[in-house]
Amino acid sequence: MSNNCAVILAGGQGKRMKSELPKPMFEVLGEPMLEWVIKSCEEAEISDLCIVKGYNAEVIEDYIGGRYDTVMQEERCGTGHAVMMASEWLEKNKGGNVLILCGDAPLVDADTIRQSLDCHIRNNNAVTVITSEVDNPFGYGRILRCADGNGIMGIVEEKDATNEQKKIREINSGAYWFKTEQLLYALERLKPNNSQGEYYLTDSVFILLDAGYRADAYISPNPDVVLGANDRRGLLRLNDAARMAIIEKQLDGGVEFLCTDGVSIGRNVKIGVGTKILQGTIIKGDTEIGEDCVIGPNCLIENCKIGRGTSLNSVQAHDSQIDDDVKIGPFVNIRPGSHIKSKVKIGDFVEVKNSEIGERTSISHLTYVGDSDVGVNVNFGCGVATANYDGESKARTLIGDNAFIGCNTNLIAPVKVGSCAYTAAGSTVTEDVPDGALAIERSDFTIKEGFGTRKLKARVKKSN
């Protein structure tokens, strides 16, 4: 598709959103609507893109970050006017076809883009409108097909449609393929001949038909291709539609959902056959989950790689790797940079940060493991903390294989606990522990008579 390109209209304000954010930057399943459209183009092998920015353009420019060309629409005078802003860019891309997409219609998919282009080229169309058939077409432009089935003869808007035309279920999605040269021809002839004084891109269809060019429509099998968001309710509907479409795809791939309440899965997430996703689970980013896992309830997983047979219950995990047959939860936080190896067990109220936890290690509960390298088959008692920060710099804790870390041990990094070593409950370990040794580091037990009475005298008096 090297001779084809796309213009994405992203200049909308979205006043009804009641926000300073440009409308295409509102998120669907954690990604801006604009990014959904861009990725669909990329998946369809269209890499030459031009983004038309407008309202609060700096936000769009910062987000694009030089990935693609942008042009500015200073005044928003309709869809045709927005495309006009890209005329100079289009002049450099003559000889092929150009796809026009709306940056706030995120559910257009790569298959629709590819197949509509095939239709466009096969029928030698000057313009191909991407359409959808819906049960309730109210508010959309209707497609008027030629009686002989040879292309279309126009688009009629809801307010201008006859009663008979309003029964037509095929509607305009707002996306089009044009031969680039024919689009430039039509743009030169667009006029703001309407009550709003705007330039409508739909008028280009009539201009090309009047000039003797062929126009047609491709009906997308994706009914959500027409969905956009003009307000927060519309944005919610988009999120619901995207969420359920992804869940349906995962179901087709052999993933099990016992209940979809509160379940949200990003479109880049990969999940293995036989894995169960329980309610309240959010999976985001480039996460990969193996076969036969149980994820949930109430998990948040982002940019993680998870092996097969692993169970996560009320776990938050970010930018980490969790291997096979691991059991974690409930109420566990796995912070970035962690690697939890096979058959590890992590119980309630544990936090692991930037650490490697060796095979078959058990961290039962109420423990913090940060910046640590933990060996195989280590046991952590309740209330252990690796104190990795001295106020100026962070250091690592090393724990050897088969070590036993007693309850309420503080390991003050940098420190090393050797293989088969023990730490006594309540110890604050500040020096390395040799292999096979027992470390006891406690202050002497001292009683100071009357200290509590004197210290709390004012408080006790006030409470009385």
Image (cartoon, rainbow, N blue to C red):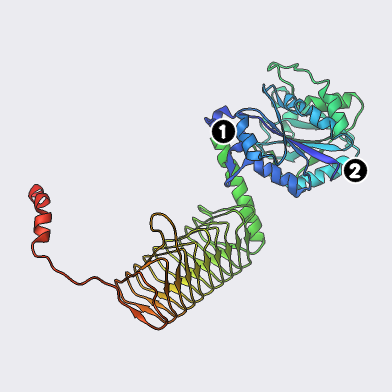
Look at the image and tell me whether residue 152 can be seen.
no
Residue 335 pos. (x, y %)? 49, 59
| Mark pair 1, 2: CA separation | 40 Å
Mark 2 Cα shell of 10 Å, populated few (<14), some (14-19), many (≥20): few
Mark 1 Cα shell of 10 Å, populated few (<14), some (14-19), many (≥20): some
Identify the residue position indicated by label 2 in the image.
122
Which marked residue is nearer to the observer: mark 1 or mark 2? 1
Q: Is residue 101 above or below residue 438?
A: above
Q: Quadrant of the N terminus?
A: top right
How many numbered tags mark residues here? 2
Q: Residue at x 80, y 28 (%)?
A: 88
Camera-side residue: 172 or 158? 172
Specify the amino acid type for callout 1. Answer: Leu
Identify the secondary structure beneath mark 1. loop
First of labels 1, 2 by sequence position: 1
Q: Are marks 1 and 2 in contact (CB under 8 Å)?
A: no
Identify the secondary structure beneath mark 2. helix
Identify the residue position indicated by label 1 in the image.
21
* Quadrant of the rendered image containing residue 167: top right
Q: Residue at x 62, y 37 (%)?
A: 62
* Quadrant of the rendered image containing residue 350: bottom left
Residue 279 pos. (x, y %)? 50, 57
Q: Is residue 78 left or right of residue 450?
A: right
| Number of the label disc, if any, that sits on residue 409 | none
Look at the image and tell me whether residue 246 can be seen.
yes
Specify the amino acid type for callout 2. Answer: Arg
Q: Residue at x 37, y 79 (%)?
A: 422
